[in-house]
Image (spheres, helix red, strand yellow):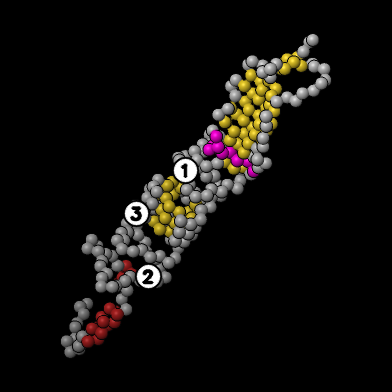
Amino acid sequence: MTQIHDLSQGDLREIWDAIRDLRYATNQNHMAIGRSGMSVYDGGAITIENGGLYVTGSATISGELIADGTITMTGIFTATGDVNLNGPVDIAGATTITGDVTSAGHFTQTGPTDLNGTTTVAGDTTVTGDFTVNGPMKTTSTLSVEGVTTLKNDLNVTTGKIVAGDVTIDPGYFDGSLKFANGSYLAATPNGAQLVKGSGAVTVSTSQADMGVGLNAIIVNSTGTFLNNLPTTTEPANLYISEGGRVYRSTA
């Protein structure tokens, strides 16, 4: 049956109904943006309340990204510029960093970390696990080791001394020396290896060994044994000392 339009009645009621529908319409709940995109300009902003933002493609931010809450990532984070960390950082997974890293706060890493670029740490750094360095390591300040230290290779000291309690290894004294707190020392002197305490000394060289205190000495070399500065006695002789100081056992 065909609807008959009554021309005697106006369309004002339908107009108000259409306006009402527009006022309460929620078309943006299922809004789609095509290739031309959407632009927010002149200080405008997009506010999301009690909702979320889902990006399955890529998000490009050419300005500044400010986050006051928690940032959770399950994928790969790549930074090609400087990274400034001013607060505590806790990383539980593997991390590969090819650029500079500056950390002014605490940095906690529980997973593998690869640092392929220059790394500067201005704050305290604590390592509770194994710390392995495969390349050269340099420290220009004081190094304090409070635990047991094991060296499986050479220890080269080019300048300075090695101090172990009251014992000092001094490479600059003679050709190297080992000094003790009581004033005695073992040194590589021009005359040979020498152990000295006060006026007493024991010296060993390639052709001679001697032990003496002051002018009194026992000297042993390839020629024989010599006693220097011997006192005299009237007791019967059982040793014969030549004028040069060589000692013989007397059979007379």
Left or right: 139 with respect to 228? Answer: left
Report whether residue 106 is seen: yes
Q: Identify the secondary structure beneath mark 1.
A: loop
Q: Are marks 2 and 1 in contact (CB under 8 Å)?
A: no
Residue 39, percent from left and from top: 25, 67
Vertically, is 84 above or below 171? below
First-in-chain label (2 vs 1): 2
Rounded to the nearest angstrom, the CA distance separating label 1 from label 3 is 25 Å
Location of mark 2 (residue)? 48
Q: What is the three-letter code of the residue carrying label 2? A: Ile
The residue closer to the viewer here, 29 or 117, is 117
Q: Residues within 10 Å of mark 3 (few under 14, many from 20)?
A: few
Disc 3 marks a residue whose amino acid type is Gly
Disc nearest the viewer among 1 and 3: 1
The residue identified by callout 3 is 81
First in residue order: circle 3 vs circle 2:
2
Residue assigned mark 1: 137
What residue is rendered at 57% in x and 31% in y?
188
Q: Nearer the viewer, residue 227 or 8?
A: 227
Q: Foreground residue, 169 or 137?
A: 169
Q: Where are the magenta residues, as a range? A: 166-174
Position of residue 75 relative to residue 159, above or below, is below
